[in-house]
Amino acid sequence: SQQGEEDPQALSIQEGENATMNCSYKTSINNLQWYRQNSGRGLVHLILIRSNEREKHSGRLRVTLDTSKKSSSLLITASRAADTASYFCARAYSGTSYGKLTFGQGTILTVHP
Amino acid sequence: DGGITQSPKYLFRKEGQNVTLSCEQNLNHDAMYWYRQDPGQGLRLIYYSQIVNDFQKGDIAEGYSVSREKKESFPLTVTSAQKNPTAFYLCASSRQGGVAFFGQGTRLTVV
């Protein structure tokens, strides 16, 4: 299976704290993407990191990728109540379209005001 | 506004019925995708299409069918052969080499 793991499954923090979510995968990837999903809604793309990149930033988001360990992490700094959502990592494998993705089970993030 | 529109938002199906979920995009994207999401789970790929009149099975295609007669449209039919169709269905599109943009989903319930 190409499924990986995400941890933690759930994360509860206070506003202002940092949130870190981790993602592992099993086979070589073209790129890894992080998405956010508010309850009962569609997914919103957050950031894409290619297999030859090690770190990317976008606003309060920082994503790292370690291809030797087949793992990635998403860091949200100075979290806000509005960051409460599910976060998914999704892998695009070599030779496939960037939209043909394999998703993890996600991390449910709750940020308390 | 550009985007992906899924309809209906909620759909109820009786046992043995086929139902069709609509997905329309005006982003001029070549590729379109259908994913299924079960409670507390990630998304799983049902079907995808990279160009008009062509589509491929994803990981869980059994009990589903699609068509891609127009670039803008990629309807998904959930057939009576799908034994456990209750789920949240998400449509997405992307340009070649681009990331996926998702619709707001259709929640299908068997009654």
Image: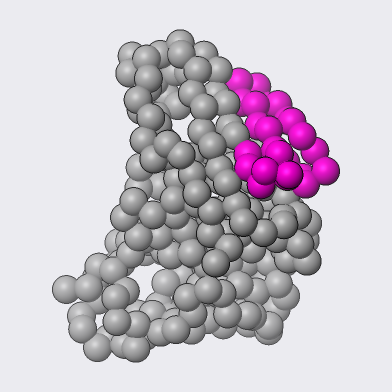
Residue that protrudes farthest toward the top in the picture = A16
Point out the image quarter for the N terminus of chain A. bottom right
- At 49% from the left and 44% from the top, the residue drawn is A6
- How was the colour assigned to the protein in this rendering? one colour
- A85 part of magenta stretch: no
Residue B77, given in percent of the width and then of the height, sits at 43, 80
State whether residue A44 appears in this view: no
Residue that protrudes farthest toward the front in the picture = A69
Residue A20, given in percent of the width and then of the height, sits at 52, 27
User: In which quadrant of the rendered view does residue B109 lie?
Assistant: bottom left
- A65 part of magenta stretch: yes
- At 42% from the left and 36% from the top, the residue drawn is A8
Query: Seen in the image, is A62 located left or right of residue A105?
Result: right
Query: Seen in the image, is B6 located left or right of residue A14?
Result: right
- At 40% from the left and 84% from the top, the residue drawn is B63
Residue that protrudes farthest toward the left in the picture = B111
Residue A88, given in percent of the width and then of the height, sits at 51, 45
Q: Is residue B23 above or below residue A36?
A: below
Point out the image quarter for the C terminus of chain A. top left
Q: Nearer the viewer, residue B1 or A76?
A: A76
Query: Seen in the image, is A15 located left or right of residue B97?
Result: left
User: In which quadrant of the rendered view does residue A100 lie?
Assistant: bottom right
Q: Nearer the viewer, residue A72 or B3?
A: A72
State whether residue A3 appears in this view: yes
Q: Nearer the viewer, residue B98 or B6?
A: B98
Q: Is residue A42 above or below residue B59?
A: above
Q: Is residue B37 above or below residue A61?
A: below
Residue B81, given in percent of the width and then of the height, sits at 34, 88
Magenta segment, which residues?
A49-72
The tally of labels here is: 0
- At 34% from the left and 51% from the top, the residue drawn is B40
Q: Is residue B70 above or below residue A78?
A: below
